Image (cartoon, rainbow, N blue to C red):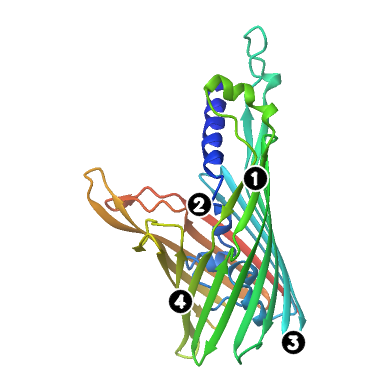
Amino acid sequence: MKHSIYLFFCILSLNVLAQTTAPKYSNEFLNIGAGAAALGMSGTSVSFVDDVTSGYWNPAGLNRLKSKYEGSLMHSEYFAGIAKYDYGAVAVKLDTSSTLAVSIIRFGVDNIPDTRYLYDANGTINYNNLKSFSVADYAGIISYAKKNILLQNLNLGGNFKIIRRQVGQFANAWGFGLDAGAQYYYRKWRFGLMARDITGTYNAWSFNTDEFKDVFALTGNRIPENSVEVTLPKAILGASRYFTLMSRIGVNAGIDADFTFDGKRNTVISSNAVSIDPKFGLEVNYVKIVYIRAGIGNIQKVPDFNKEVQTKAQVNFGIGIRIKKIQLDYALANVGDARSTGAKSDALYSNIFSLKVGIQ
């Protein structure tokens, strides 16, 4: 057990020291998503999202709230319940053309054993010295949206993000960033653009080295120094269309594409300049009360043990029910491990629940 905590600090040291400029993956907890409805469609909602979760997916969608006040809660667990993700948001229409929303996100692993002092001075195990700590990431998102500013049917919105990341009493960071979004409706088509971290999101890390410098010295690791981690800009383009079948059945089909600019990634389209990761989603509703959803994303080329490369994808499913202004949604979503062996997938699936309520 003592060696396990040493290993934890070694990994933490390597990760943080590598993040002194602009790492390829930064603030990844902000890419998990919000609302089981959207996650059941693999997050393909940039072009048509129109509820309180717009503060996460595309703030421009807040202009299309169906209620004056709207709130949402979501909970999910990952890695067999080790990591927990919680999301909550409220939105209010300020007037006929503007909306304000506040979203809170927490992603954390709690009750991690701290065994540094498990052995006393005599080398005897003393469980009274066993403590625990949490590693948690927090984000507060303030969103504002305005409709019909430049063109009819054009909605614009923006986010101001405050980020707090904490590794027990050993390290912490504060970060700030901006997002911008737009939605445009043309006849039966809907288009969306979400620009995340448009100016770069900066996390300033500070370390309480007194808590772990002895451990680092024993394991031969370099003591980390205070540094700044930068999350580079990312763009998401989306398009969707709504169809009506047999008067009672509606179908919403959409496609999103994530554009990253930090070098090659394992995506469908990849180059040194830009990588593109497409996602596809489908939602079928019956009289807008019962919903069935499916989505596909995280398409990757994965080598097997024989070094043969295969294309794998993450598939999500979801259902929902809405009664008046109360909506309950469930999604079965893949954490992101797209590997599989034959017909058996070794991916870890997560159960996601969310509740949305509108008032007035």
The span from disc 1 to disc 4 (Cα, nearest Å) is 33 Å
Check disc 4: other Cα within 10 Å, few if <14, some if 14-19, many if 20+: many
- Which marked residue is nearer to the observer: mark 2 or mark 1? 2
- Which marked residue is nearer to the observer: mark 3 or mark 2? 2
Image quarter of residue 313:
bottom left
Left or right? Give the position of 178 relative to 287: right
The x, y position of residue 232, in whole percent, is 54, 59
- Which marked residue is nearer to the observer: mark 4 or mark 2? 2
Whichever of callouts 1 and 3 sits on the residue coming sooner in the sequence is 3
Judging by the rendered image, the residue that carries numbered circle 1 is: 136
Circle 1/circle 4 CB separation < 8 Å:
no
Whichever of callouts 3 and 2 sits on the residue coming sooner in the sequence is 2
Amino acid type, residue under disc 1 in the picture: Ala
List the single residue furthest toward the top. Answer: 122
Give the secondary structure at mark 1: strand
Query: Is residue 181 depicted above or below 177 in this figure?
Result: below
Quarter of the figure that contains the C terminus: bottom right
Q: Which mark is residue 96?
A: 3
Quarter of the figure that contains the N terminus: top right
Q: Which mark is residue 254?
A: 4
Judging by the rendered image, the residue that carries numbered circle 2 is: 25
The x, y position of residue 98, in whole percent, is 73, 81
Question: Which of these two is toward me, 171 or 274?
Answer: 274
Circle 3/circle 2 CB separation < 8 Å:
no
Query: Is residue 199 depicted above or below 221 in this figure?
Result: below
Question: Which of these two is toward me, 173 or 327?
Answer: 173
The span from disc 1 to disc 3 (Cα, nearest Å) is 38 Å
Whichever of callouts 2 and 1 sits on the residue coming sooner in the sequence is 2
Question: Which of these two is toward me, 334 or 207?
Answer: 207
The span from disc 4 to disc 2 (Cα, nearest Å) is 26 Å
